[in-house]
Image (cartoon, grey):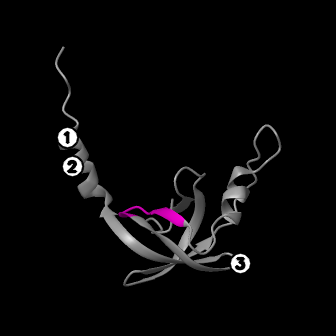
Amino acid sequence: MSDPNDGVTVRLLPAAEPLPCRVESLNGRRLILRLSSSPASPSANGNDPAKDSSKDLKMGALVEVLTEPFLYLGEVLGRQEELLIIEVEHSVNRKALAAIQETWDIPQES
């Protein structure tokens, strides 16, 4: 059985690099994440886009959290070093979303 934290990411909206993290807890609409340390992935100019995104994850930031079963959209309420506290505004079941997308993605006939 796989770890439910495998592949969990948090991303600053609208278009920052996703950062690996672990779900510490989810109580009601309060989601607590622990940012993972990941190997450095600097760009050609020597900047690390993930590190830059991590600095911007502060109170009031809008984020997307992607887990295996759900996509969460919310706002950062606070941060304590690598811990992020997020107020979840919307959650979407990814399997249900895939089924809806499949229904709406009807191939066009030529």
Q: Is residue 30 above or below residue 100?
A: below
Q: Residue at x 36, y 64 (%)?
A: 70
> Residue 31 appears at what percent x and percent y?
47, 78
**Which disc is residue 104 wearing?**
1
Secondary structure of residue under mark 2: helix
Q: Residue at x 69, y 59 (%)?
A: 38
In this picture, residue 83 sits left or right of residue 92: right
Along the line of sight, which residue is nearer the eye, 109 or 61?
A: 61
- Residue most extreme to the bottom: 27
Residue behind mark 2:
100
Q: Is residue 15 above or below residue 80?
A: above
> Residue 17 appears at what percent x and percent y?
60, 51
Residue behind mark 3:
81
Which kind of residue does numbered mark 2 sit on? Ile
In this picture, residue 94 sits left or right of residue 30: left
> Residue 84 appears at what percent x and percent y?
59, 76
Q: Do callouts 2 and 1 mark residues in contact (Cβ within 8 Å)?
A: yes
Label 3 crowd bin: few (<14), some (14–19), many (20+), radius 10 Å: few
Q: Is residue 108 above or below residue 39?
A: above
**Which disc is residue 44 wearing?**
none
Chain-order first, disc 1 or disc 3: 3
* Quadrant holding the N terminus: bottom left
In this picture, residue 43 sits left or right of residue 24: right
Secondary structure of residue under mark 1: helix
Q: Is residue 79 above or below residue 15?
A: below
Q: Which residues are magenta?
A: 62-71
Which kind of residue does numbered mark 3 sit on? Glu
